[in-house]
Image (spheres, rainbow, N blue to C red):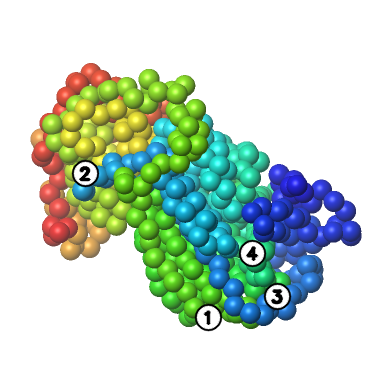
Amino acid sequence: MDTRNKSGGNTRNMKEDNMCLRSKSGRNRILLTLVPILLAVSLAVTGLVAAGCPAPVTVAPEPAAVAPTEGRQIITILHTNDLHGRIEPYFLLEDGRERGGLTRIATVVNEIRQKEPNVILVDAGDTIHGTMLSDLYEGKSMISVMNAMAYDVMVAGNHDFHWRGADTILARAAEATFPIISANVIRRDTLSPLLPPFIFIDVGRVRIAFLGLTTRGTPGTVGHGLVADLEFLDPVEMAALYVPYLKERADLVIILAHISGAEEDKIAKTVPGVDVIVHGHDHARRSKVVNDTLIVAAGCWGFHLGYLRLTVNKGRIVDYEKRLIPITADIKEVPQIASLIEQYRRPFANYIDEVVGYTATDLIWGGWGVWIVARQQTNLGYLVTDAMRKAVRADIGLYTPWWIRDNMPAGYFRMCVIHAVLPFDWHKIILAALRGETIRTILEEAGVVLQAAGLTYKFDRGRPVGERVTELLINGKPVEMDKIYTVAIGTYMWEAGLRKGLFQQEDLIKDTGILVRDAVANHLREVRSVDLGVTEIEVLPKPW
């Protein structure tokens, strides 16, 4: 019986029983009651907010510290990260093959569970947002499938706060049969954790503490207004606060870290007692050891399932095996999972599968680790910005390349493909009136090659900021620095420009409310076919 309530508290009297137990597959999952530690964390948070560093705290000694277990024990950690709503298999442009899909990951997980007795399935965040099948349900469909796969724990990633911020992740946590954790996301009003900071899982004779950490960059990726009621604390400082407490009460401490690689390396180097970090956030495949801490990551989109087999003796990892298992089209699907997915797909099948248009050439985004669209103009970037400017009749269109998230293979394409390319519902078109000098400054200070339509520019990365744009034409004519041009930009660029003082409110002509994705879809419905093979931006030196 599940004695843990949905907010992570305890339904029983704390004096009688200070732990919540859940039996599953012969294992006890223990979620520590948060009441004793929340006061201590609140005090520490007060110090963090006020002084920028942790205040000294005394953590309540519950549960009692445990002695390291005797005898060798084998434990297998299966891990995913950055699934981004990829419930269904995905067509990989680079090799023309189908990859991933939770129906196939489930097959591999089930096979390993049948062979190995002590298996824990975890996810390192950015899980529920990114495809139509997940986004139409605000991630509920993803959680439902993960429940069926018997995930054990997940950390909240930045993109798991889409749609309604804290309300979204709390709703999904209430539906999940596994805990969703994060130690450094707190409510501004109460200075208390939004989610359970950690859980204990007993597997065999070994107790494992799982600590969750979420990137501080969350507000900039989901829209500042959505998470204005939350504070995202320094994950390194919060790891230093929690790990000593957890290490006294568990054989192993594993951090599910949806943070930067630099931050997790710092944790490994400066916070004693961290045995494993399961990484998410940058979509990298990681396999390394830093200061005796194992760091692993499985890439993204379910192309691989991470496998980490630990041999534990007396509270220490004495041996390990780690690898990535490719999830390919030759892996059979689990019928029950496929049937569950179909239940979510069926009501929206016509919308998901609508054929929107045709492209004679591959429209290029790049790929994780090879983010071409951030290094040079691509035909896909041109398509997006051209559709933006035409939707609002602007002189030019500009778009930040980080928000383009997939390729469009040559041939007929469906609405679900456009959604995967542009999955962000808060990215709408802002129509602004900007001077030529401001437009040049935007291009200079962006740090990446902005995707554009209606303008041509030459960009020399080897020059200092302020001298990198060596030529700038708008509608075929040299830019006039004092002339006002109408510009279609995305919400993120507008908000960032306001924060930096680059834009002023009086520059706003209209917040159109038009989703960038919808502008592209409508443009393609109108033209029906595109054949884009040229760019309007020359980048020096060449990125390859």
- Decide: few, some or many residues near mark 1? Use Cα within 10 Å; few <14, some 14-19, many ≥20: few
User: Which of 257 and 465 lies nearest the eye of the viewer?
Assistant: 257
Q: Amino acid at mark 1?
A: Val
Between the residue at mark 3 and the residue at mark 4, the CA separation in whole angstroms equals: 17 Å
What is the x, y in percent for residue 181?
A: 61, 54
| Residue depth check, mark 1 versus mark 3: number of the one nearer the observer | 1
For mark 3, what is the residue? 248
Mark earlier in primary sequence (1, 2): 2
Between the residue at mark 4 and the residue at mark 2, the CA separation in whole angstroms equals: 41 Å
What is the x, y in percent for residue 144?
A: 55, 38
Q: Which structural element holds mark 3? A: loop
What is the x, y in percent for residue 291?
A: 48, 80
Q: Residue furthest front?
A: 115
Q: Which structural element holds mark 2? A: loop
| Image side of residue 396 versus residue 277, left or right | left
Q: Amino acid at mark 2?
A: Gly
- Decide: few, some or many residues near mark 3? Use Cα within 10 Å; few <14, some 14-19, many ≥20: some
- Decide: few, some or many residues near mark 2? Use Cα within 10 Å; few <14, some 14-19, many ≥20: few
Mark earlier in primary sequence (1, 3): 3
- Quarter holding residue 41: bottom right
Between the residue at mark 1 and the residue at mark 4, the CA separation in whole angstroms equals: 17 Å
Dots 4 and 2: beta carbons under 8 Å?
Answer: no
Between the residue at mark 1 and the residue at mark 2, the CA separation in whole angstroms equals: 41 Å
Q: Amino acid at mark 4?
A: Val
For mark 2, what is the residue? 96
For mark 4, what is the residue? 203
| Residue depth check, mark 4 versus mark 2: number of the one nearer the observer | 4
For mark 1, what is the residue? 318
